[in-house]
């Protein structure tokens, strides 16, 4: 099979972790006799510095003609510390989501037996936790009208959703729940927000069409508490853009490290696969960042973009083996810490020999 991938390393540790993920991708492609083509393009702060645009048209064209996008991270402190910057790296990420029609972000939250002691929660709370967060990605406050009034001292951000946007993300949530444990949690703030009342109204209309799936409704503040109190009670969670951004970062922490969890952004055009963590500029160029989330994102790429389940499973097995062996980076190491590149080499070699 021909695999045509766009690589967007981005900023900070992005280039390092994408390099390690590609080691695994190349090892799998060789093992299963796939023809691999990949092209790198600019996005984020480095794209602003180079061409003045965080998501250049050339990058978008590459993404559109590719079968999948493997993305690293964006962000740079010089923009974080300048609230008046006219162009920001994050605008590139939002533009990519909008122009590619990436309306759903899928984040699996899964604990690893060898790392349960690293979780900030007690072992009995997190052992066996395994759920999926589905976040609406192209609507809500991040894309609504925003600005400042004439005096500059009053700011506004508008949260807007249409019925169509809510229906399509809920449909995806039900499809995931049907393949898992048949439970869907719809997270909103319907006691306060009109946009959330639309979410709940649409969900209540759709629920009877899925009689074999248990649908529950939960306010976002309650959901934030229950992720910490009873993470094993969730199966599939679906929510709007801002709530999903916050809750998925919270959920990721229970695994013991932000460097472990992958994600897929899917929708109308080419899907994007990326780790959930940021650009971690403090570690850039030091060869210490954890590449596992990006490597697992590559596993999701094989599974979702190419429907190659066996290839994805092989990458997951290789990652599990590296963690069981303790061959990991400093954020999760118990003994000697390994470098970013050494972990990438170890996982690629495991794939080659198994």
Image: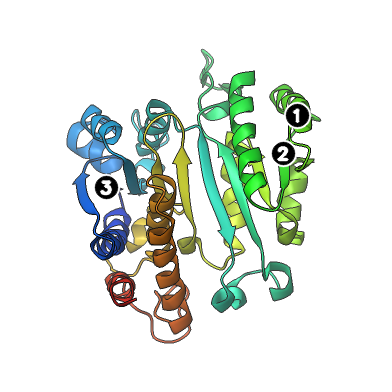
Number of residues whose C-alpha sits closer than 10 Å to that of mark 3, classed few (under 14), some (14–19) or many (20 or more): some
Q: Residue at point 64% right, 55% down?
A: 131
Asked whether the residues under the numbered discs 1 and 2 touch, taking CB atoms below 8 Å apart as contact, a structural biologist would say yes
Q: Residue at point 39% right, 42% down?
A: 272
Specify the quadrant of the image occupied by residue 141: top right
Q: Which residue is mark 2?
A: 186
Q: Residue at point 43% right, 51% down?
A: 303
Q: CA–CA distance between discs 1 and 2? A: 8 Å
Q: Residue furthest bottom?
A: 335
Q: Secondary structure at mark 2?
A: strand
Q: Which residue is mark 1?
A: 200
Q: Residue at point 70% right, 27% down?
A: 199
- Which percent across, then down, holds residue 39? 19, 45
Q: Which residue is mark 3?
A: 3
Q: Nearer the viewer, mark 3 or mark 1?
A: 3
Residue 188 seen: yes
Return the disc, 1 or 2, that comes first in the chain's sequence: 2
Return the disc, 3 or 1, that comes first in the chain's sequence: 3
Q: Between residues 289 and 34, which one lies in front from this camera angle?
A: 34
Q: CA–CA distance between discs 2 and 3? A: 35 Å
Number of residues whose C-alpha sits closer than 10 Å to that of mark 1, classed few (under 14), some (14–19) or many (20 or more): many
Q: CA–CA distance between discs 3 and 1? A: 40 Å
Q: Secondary structure at mark 1?
A: helix
């Amino acid at each position: 099979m021909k695999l045509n991938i766009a690589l967007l390393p981005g900023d900070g540790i992005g280039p390092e972790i994408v390099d390690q993920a590609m080691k695994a991708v190349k090892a799998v492609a060789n093992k299963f006799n796939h023809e691999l083509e990949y092209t790198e393009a600019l996005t984020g702060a480095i794209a602003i510095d180079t061409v003045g645009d965080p998501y250049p048209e050339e990058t978008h064209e590459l993404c559109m003609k590719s079968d999948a996008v493997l993305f690293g991270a964006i962000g740079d402190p010089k923009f974080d510390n300048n609230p008046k910057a006219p162009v920001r790296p994050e605008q590139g990420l939002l533009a990519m989501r909008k122009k590619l029609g990436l309306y759903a972000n899928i984040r699996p939250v899964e604990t690893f037996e060898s790392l349960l002691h690293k979780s900030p929660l007690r072992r009995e709370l997190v052992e066996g936790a395994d759920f999926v967060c589905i976040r609406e990605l192209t609507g809500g406050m991040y894309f609504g009208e925003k600005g400042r009034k004439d005096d500059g001292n009053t700011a506004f951000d508008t949260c807007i959703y249409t019925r169509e946007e809510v229906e399509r993300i809920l449909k995806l949530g039900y499809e995931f729940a049907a393949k898992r444990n048949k439970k869907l949690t719809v997270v909103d703030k319907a006691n306060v927000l009109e946009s959330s009342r639309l979410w709940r109204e649409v969900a209540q209309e759709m629920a009877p069409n899925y009689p074999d799936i248990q649908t529950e409704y939960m306010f976002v503040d309650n959901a934030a508490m229950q992720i910490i109190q009873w993470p094993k009670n969730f199966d599939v969670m679906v929510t709007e853009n801002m709530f999903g951004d916050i809750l998925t970062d919270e959920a990721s922490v229970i695994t013991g490290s932000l460097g472990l969890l992958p994600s897929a952004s899917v929708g109308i055009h080419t899907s994007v696969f990326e780790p959930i963590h940021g650009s971690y500029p403090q570690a850039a160029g030091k060869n210490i960042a954890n590449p596992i989330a990006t490597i697992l994102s590559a596993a999701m790429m094989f599974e979702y973009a190419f429907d190659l389940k066996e290839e994805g499973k092989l990458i997951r097995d290789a990652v599990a083996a590296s963690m069981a062996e303790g061959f990991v980076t400093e954020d999760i190491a118990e003994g000697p810490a390994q470098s970013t590149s050494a972990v990438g080499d170890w996982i690629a070699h495991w794939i080659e020999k198994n």
